[in-house]
């Protein structure tokens, strides 16, 4: 095979960069925390407050470096880099993580979470189903599951009104990359098109996709409202995320440091729940001001019920994908969320 010499300096530079990255990471007091979202996002609010609390609790012996989306790679890239130990900490959302940990697709099942977000927050913080049954799946990928939290209702932004699965016909709906989301949007009647977050604005602008789905704060900060005409609330999904650590790094922390980290993570649950509600409310107002003719459609209970029923087969697809242990987690979570499995 012929080697392209022109790539050699680039390869050498990448190797040097990686070495520098690892060397810094080896320093016990430097925790690299990568986000799937940009500056000013919900994940950024979490990481900034986490940084403040960790640095205060350790009198600056530990410093946290935050890498917002766009600085290191896609969601899949940062989850893999955390599993490999290049990063200590990251956000890894089930919308993408389901490619790596198939059981995490449970959070991509439409209408499985509660319509009451306080219930979702309580379950995601303390669930016996999650922390009792899923931890080993994370560990097998080199990850330690530290916590989960909700980021807001997932809203469709489209070029035309959608009130039924028939209206979804022919709509190229961008989804995150977890495989169950393709099944979910097929069940809703759309033509699902998975792609990374950073490509969505351009995809909408160029007409590669017609629609996308995300919480309001993200629709505002990523400017998706500029290139779509309708915002549609169907209640199908709450955006959830995990905070993960590298497994070996976490296991190798001293008892005191591990306890400090666990306490900081526990102390963050109320903070981030309030922040996401505040961000979603404020950003909706910003969208209304920036684009007064953006149409807002809230589906009625009857209209939502049609989508819910259309998606019931997705639960079987999930069980095919995640097997008996996945089914157990799904049933366990449905009981905790107070919904039907
Ligand atoms: O749509 C996505 O891909 C992304 N959306 C949010 C709100 N956070 C991270 C995720 O990658």
Image: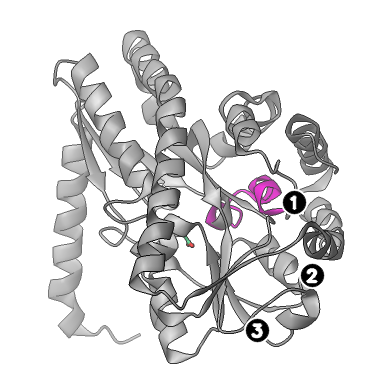
Residue bounds of the magenta highlight: 96-109
**Residue 76 in the image: above or below residue 279:** below
Q: Position of residue 226 (x, y in %)?
A: 39, 78
Report the disc number at residue 187.
2
Which of the colour schemes (rainbow, by chain, secondary structure, one colour) is used?
one colour
Please name whichever residue, 315 or 227, is drawn nearer the observer in this view of the structure. 227
Question: How far is the residue under mark 2 from the one under mark 3?
Answer: 13 Å
Please name whichever residue, 87 or 175, is drawn nearer the observer in this view of the structure. 175
**Residue 154 in the image: above or below residue 121:** below
**Residue 229 in the image: above or below residue 50:** below
Report the predominant secondary structure element of the magenta stretch.
helix
Q: Position of residue 7 (x, y in %)?
A: 20, 79
Q: Which of marks 2 and 1 is in front?
A: 1
**Residue 258 in the image: above or below residue 219:** above
Report the disc number at residue 111.
1
Q: Name the residue under label 3.
A: 171
The earlier-in-sequence mark between 2 and 1 is 1
């Amino acid at each position: 095979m012929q080697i392209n010499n022109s790539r050699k300096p680039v390869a050498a530079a990448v190797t040097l960069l990686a070495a520098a990255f690892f060397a810094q990471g080896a320093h016990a007091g430097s925790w690299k925390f990568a986000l799937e979202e940009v500056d000013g996002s919900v994940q950024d609010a979490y990481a900034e407050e986490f940084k403040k609390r960790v640095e205060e609790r350790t009198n600056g012996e530990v410093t946290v470096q935050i890498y917002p989306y766009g600085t290191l790679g896609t969601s899949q890239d940062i989850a893999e880099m955390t599993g490999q130990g290049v990063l200590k900490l990251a956000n890894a959302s089930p919308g993408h993580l389901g490619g790596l940990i198939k059981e995490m697709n449970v959070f991509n099942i439409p209408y499985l979470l509660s319509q009451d977000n306080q219930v979702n927050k309580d379950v995601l913080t303390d669930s016996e189903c999650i922390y009792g049954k899923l931890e080993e799946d994370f560990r097998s990928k080199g990850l330690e599951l530290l916590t989960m939290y909700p980021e807001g209702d997932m809203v469709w932004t489209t070029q035309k009104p959608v009130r039924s699965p028939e209206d979804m016909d022919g709509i190229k709906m961008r989804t995150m990359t977890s495989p169950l989301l393709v099944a979910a949007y097929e069940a809703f009647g759309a033509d699902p098109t998975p792609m990374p977050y950073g490509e969505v604005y351009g995809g909408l602008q160029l007409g590669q996709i017609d629609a996308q789905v995300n919480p309001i704060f993200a629709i505002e900060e990523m400017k998706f409202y500029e290139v779509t005409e309708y915002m549609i609330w169907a209640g199908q999904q709450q955006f959830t995320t995990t905070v993960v650590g590298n497994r070996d790094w976490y296991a190798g922390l001293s008892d005191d440091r591990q306890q400090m980290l666990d306490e900081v993570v526990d102390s963050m649950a109320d903070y981030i729940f309030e922040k996401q509600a505040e961000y979603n409310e404020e950003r909706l107002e910003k969208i209304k001001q920036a684009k007064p003719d953006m149409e807002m459609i809230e589906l009625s209970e009857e209209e939502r019920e049609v989508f819910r029923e259309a998606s019931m087969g997705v639960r079987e697809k999930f069980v095919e994908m995640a097997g008996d242990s996945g089914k157990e987690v799904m049933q366990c979570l449905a009981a905790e969320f107070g919904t039907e499995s």
